[in-house]
Image (tube, rainbow, N blue to C red):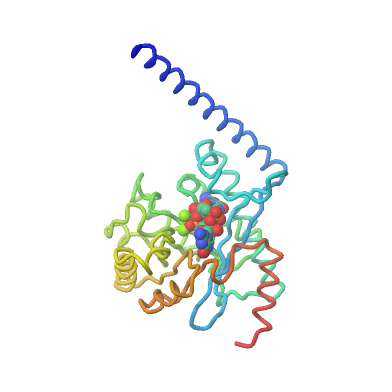
Amino acid sequence: RAKDSGRNAIQLFRTSMQAAASERLRLENELRQALLRGEFELFFQPQVDARSGQVIGAEALLRWQHPTLGAQSPALFIQVLEDSGLILPVGGWVLSEACRACEQLIAEQLVDGDDFSLCVNISPQQFRQSNFVEQVAASLRDSGLPRAMLKLEITEGIVIHNLDDTIAKMHRLKKLGVSFAMDDFGTGYSSLTYLKRLPVDVLKIDQSFVRDATHDPNDAEIVRAIVAMARSLGLSMIAEGVEQQEQLDFLQQQGCHLYQGYLYSRPLPLAEFRALLVHAKQRPQ
Ligand code: C2E
Ligand code: MG
Ligand code: MG
Ligand code: MG
């Protein structure tokens, strides 16, 4: 009967909700353990100037070296880190570890402060911590990384709480010497009003537009619009998720020459990223 099947549906819904909740809790506990056991690792994805072929920077990307499953992408667990507040200690670790690794590459003369930047993803929650500016300053001081090498990648979600506070904090960080990239640009609350007021240096063109620009006229138009916007605001831009030569050709035609993506390299463990830099240095330009 209808009444019974309705009740059964609710029961089934409750059961699956409980299963999802306990799965979430299990993952949260595993992540907490992972932090304690040192199972997090940073991968580095090169950023390239297509005109010169030079590596001009790298984005640090979090990985969880799961004991049995291997390297796990944050796409699978970043939401749990956010919801549980674990993003704060993990994000703090990412920041100091990325600065330390990059300073090591400088010491080995593989990169140089004048033409290389280190990009670190910062979650909105992490940015909103009252002592965030001090945390960044401490990571820079402890690692000895030249301040101008650090670029913080933020998303448009950062402004939803309080625009004035966000701007003030960004200015304090810029005073330290660091710069800002707006990640996943075009996918969030991209208001021109925000963009005009935020002291952002670089727009990262989201990979969804890059992926489809060569076969979807709407996405091609969005890329053109982003490039035009970046130009008129005096910002530089970088495309992410470039996988095919065709996509790079299109971006360059539009005037976007900086990119990262599988076409050049996947994100690499530090040792492999170092090897790539050694190799790039040996190759005549
Ligand atoms: P994101 O910051 O937009 O990073 C770019 C993502 O695109 C990375 O995924 C990278 O591996 C992937 N990617 C790069 N090139 C290509 C390509 O050519 N094709 C395709 N299909 N993908 C490409 P990843 O490493 O899985 O990270 C996913 C997201 O997780 C990041 O997106 C970022 O939002 C977040 N994330 C990663 N590391 C951190 C971190 O340390 N802190 C915080 N708060 N978030 C992080
Ligand atoms: Mg990013
Ligand atoms: Mg992105
Ligand atoms: Mg993304």
Quarter assignment of residue 54: bottom right
- x, y percentage for residue 51? 48, 82
For the N terminus, the image quarter is: top left
* On screen, residue 284 above or below 109: below
Observer able to see residue 134: no
Q: Is residue 206 left or right of residue 46?
A: left
Direction front: furthest residue: 1
Q: Quadrant of residue 253?
A: bottom left
How many tags in the picture? 0
Foreground residue, 248 or 56? 248
Q: Position of residue 223 (x, y in %)?
A: 34, 67
- Specify whether residue 41 is in view: yes
Q: Nearer the viewer, residue 143 or 221?
A: 221
The one of 191 and 151 positioned closer to us in this rendering: 191
Query: Residue at horizontal 40%, vertical 14%?
Result: 7
In the displayed orientation, state which residue is furthest to the bottom: 284
Left or right side of 28 for 247:
left
Q: Position of residue 40 (x, y in %)?
A: 66, 49
In the rendered view, would you say 13 is above or below 275?
Answer: above
Residue 111 in the image: x percent, y percent?
Answer: 63, 74
Residue at the spot 44% in from the left edge and 61% down from the top edge: 207
Q: Quadrant of the C terminus?
A: bottom right
